[in-house]
Image: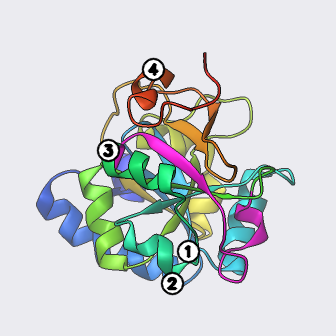
Amino acid sequence: MNSANARSTPFWSPAEVDAAVREAILHLENRGVLAYPTETVYGFGTAVDHESVETLVRMKGRPPGKPFLLLIAHPSQIARLDLHLPTYAAHLSARFWPGPLTLVLPGGDKRVSPRLRGPEGGVAVRWTPHEPLQRLLHAYGEPITSTSANRPGVPPATMASEILEQWPDMIHRGILHVLDGGRLAPSPPSTVVDCTGRRPRVIRPGVLSASVLRDVVPDLIGDR
């Protein structure tokens, strides 16, 4: 058995996903960090409570003012966090979710850790289309945080073995639990749209071009 198999959990086939979900949820409930495949690259995530988020901040060495986003299993989870969908954001989510679109939403003042709030004042949210991750999120019933699985200056991981090589101490200490979803195809990041103002604004170009988004929200600002 190689080290990747010995120190990570298979997370590819439906049977593997079903077998992995319970342990992954227990790890989140114990305020650990989960590494998981997404539709773009591998991510690190935790529960959204303050202690869990701070564990991820320390592990990543995250500077102040650089937040994590939230992955959801269904838009109903937005309301439970007291986040708000402006009308134009609702149009974007109806057209492009689940998919590679991240919306920065207002609200959540009493429900969301300040570490999750960006310089625009909002909280970044994406409904992931990655099916195994969706199944985990549905079973967990709550959003999880998300940031790329890599050390500073190193490209985001596209294989679980890269995480195992970069973070052996965290895995050995039981802080990090790795779900192995195989090799991920190279992909641009999600497009990030700030929805905290009167008009939507692209703050990070990605998979969805501004011209595609303007078919839904013609007054979109940014990304040409």
Give how far apart the Cα atoms at labels 3 and 2 are.
33 Å
Q: Name the residue under label 1.
A: 47
- Give the x, y percent position of residue 140: 37, 78
The kind of residue tagged 1 is: Ala
Q: Kindly indicate whether the residue at mark 2 contacts the one at mark 1 (C-beta within 8 angstroms).
A: yes
Packing grade of label 2 (10 A; few <14, some 14-19, many >=20) is some
Q: Which of marks 3 and 1 is nearer the N terminus?
A: 1
Packing grade of label 4 (10 A; few <14, some 14-19, many >=20) is few
Give how far apart the Cα atoms at labels 1 and 4 are.
35 Å
Residue 61 magenta-highlighted: no
Q: Mark 3 points at which residue?
A: 95
**Residue 29 badge:** 2
Q: Mark 4 points at which residue?
A: 211
Q: Is mark 3 on a helix, strand or loop?
A: helix
Q: Earlier in the sequence, mark 3 or mark 2?
A: 2
Residue 99 magenta-highlighted: yes
> As displayed, is residue 213 above or below residue 179?
above
